[in-house]
Image (tube, rainbow, N blue to C red):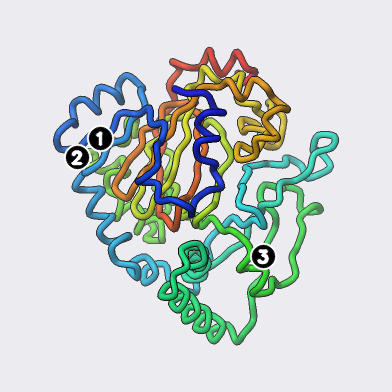
């Protein structure tokens, strides 16, 4: 592992356009296994609760061929009408938060992060994601496709834009803020994180949940022949969570209290990882804070690092994940996510392990 200052200064997280990731020097600290050549080694790593990347699983690659190789496959399935939860932000940094009881219960001086939630059809999200790529890459072809998609959308809507709903994570009805309808100019300036949360209960009823579980049989605890490697503890599975990202979207560093399998089915993402032993150096919001378990400073802004000098000494590594890659992330490992372009990612959690609990408890998270 390397110091945060070394890794982040080498490649600023906001830099997603100036150089193809394949040509960068990255501080990769994970083993990458081929499913058909190194399955037993990868299984050993998983059983030892060590992070790794595995690729070339025929079942995963079959999904990549549908989702990534055919640009209209998901569009045809998810459509232009039904709306899905979508995080949005006027800046590219996304911070998770939960205000229990509304803003009146927030800590003194607390400011709600600028990202909130709305609902959006997949087709509109895809249009905005392609627009970010077109502008970053200077692609005339992509820009023409985006223009055509926008014209069709506005024609369907009668040239009326759709507004948003309540901000992310505010539970108190009295404190929910309602937006006026967003202008097209406003939409084009924002970043969007498209979400599908599928559950077994929903899959049994034939909803979009069923589509997700049918497509991703290796994440389905009922299909043990396909999923035994990825779903470690089927009794503790917690659904399949998909996050489709656009170029530049960053999810703040955090840890989760469960093991996780994270698969990329299209595009690329950069994951910056840290062992739970680095907890005390990660400048985390404490228990009781709306963004607990998340770093309080902007990893892309070196001027903020001086607020927490210990952060510059934290040890991390990174990996650029491509379509067909699956990352195994054990319980409580830190991860900071940079979307390098339009991408399709789904993950599945299955159980909690305790091998790093003492690190997490030591820095205030019992």
Seen at 40% across and 55% down, the residue is 209
From the top left corner, tell me how far across and down residue 213 is, in percent: 33, 52
Q: Considering only order in the chain, which callout, 3 or 2, is on the residue closer to the N terminus?
A: 3
- Residue density around tag 3, few if under 14, some if 14–19, many if 20 or more, within 10 Å: some
Instruction: Residue under label 2, please give it.
Output: 225
Q: Measure how far apart labels 1 and 3 are at the Cα level.
A: 40 Å
Q: Measure how far apart labels 2 and 1 are at the Cα level.
A: 6 Å
Instruction: Residue under label 3, please give it.
Output: 164
Q: Are marks 2 and 1 in contact (CB under 8 Å)?
A: yes
**Which image quarter: residue 310?**
top right
From the top left corner, tell me how far across and down residue 179 is, in percent: 74, 65
Residue 242's disc number = none
Instruction: Residue under label 1, please give it.
Output: 228
Q: Considering only order in the chain, which callout, 3 or 1, is on the residue closer to the N terminus?
A: 3
Q: Are marks 1 and 3 in contact (CB under 8 Å)?
A: no
Please, is residue 186 above or below residue 171 in the view?
Answer: below
**Which image quarter: residue 24?**
top left
From the top left corner, tell me how far across and down residue 167 is, in percent: 69, 54
Seen at 14% across and 34% down, the residue is 37
Seen at 71% across and 51% down, the residue is 114
Q: Quadrant of the N terminus?
A: top left
- Residue density around tag 1, few if under 14, some if 14–19, many if 20 or more, within 10 Å: some
């Amino acid at each position: 592992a390397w110091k945060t200052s070394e890794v982040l200064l080498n490649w600023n997280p906001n830099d997603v356009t100036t150089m193809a990731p394949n040509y960068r020097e990255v501080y990769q600290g994970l083993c990458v296994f081929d499913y058909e050549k190194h399955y037993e080694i990868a299984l050993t790593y998983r059983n030892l609760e060590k992070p790794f990347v595995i690729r070339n699983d025929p079942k995963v690659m079959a999904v990549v061929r549908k989702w990534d190789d055919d640009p209209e496959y998901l569009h045809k399935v998810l459509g232009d009408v039904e709306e899905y939860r979508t995080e949005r932000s006027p800046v590219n940094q996304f911070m998770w938060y939960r205000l229990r009881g509304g803003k009146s219960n927030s800590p003194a001086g607390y400011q709600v992060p600028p990202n909130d939630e709305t609902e959006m059809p997949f087709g509109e999200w895809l249009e905005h994601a392609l627009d970010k790529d077109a502008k970053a890459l200077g692609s005339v072809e992509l820009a023409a496709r985006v223009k055509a998609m926008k014209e069709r959308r506005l024609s369907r809507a009668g040239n009326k834009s759709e507004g948003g709903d309540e901000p992310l994570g505010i539970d108190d009805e009295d404190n929910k803020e309602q937006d006026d309808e967003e202008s097209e100019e406003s939409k084009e300036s924002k970043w969007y994180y498209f979400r599908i949360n599928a559950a077994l209960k929903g899959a049994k009823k034939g909803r979009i949940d069923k589509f997700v579980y049918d497509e991703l049989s290796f994440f389905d605890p009922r299909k043990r022949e396909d999923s035994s490697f990825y779903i470690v503890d089927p009794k503790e599975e917690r659904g399949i969570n998909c996050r489709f990202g656009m170029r530049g979207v960053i999810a703040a560093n955090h840890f989760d209290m469960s093991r996780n399998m994270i698969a990329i089915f299209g595009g690329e993402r950069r994951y910056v990882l840290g062992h739970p032993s680095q907890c005390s150096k990660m400048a985390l919001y404490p228990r009781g804070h709306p963004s607990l378990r998340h770093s309080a400073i902007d990893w892309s802004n070196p001027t903020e690092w001086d607020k927490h000098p210990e952060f510059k000494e934290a040890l991390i590594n990174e990996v650029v994940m491509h379509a067909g890659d699956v990352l195994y992330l054990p319980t409580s490992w830190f991860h900071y996510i940079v979307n390098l372009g339009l991408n399709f990612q789904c993950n599945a959690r299955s159980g909690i392990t305790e091998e790093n609990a003492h690190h997490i408890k030591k820095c205030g998270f019992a």
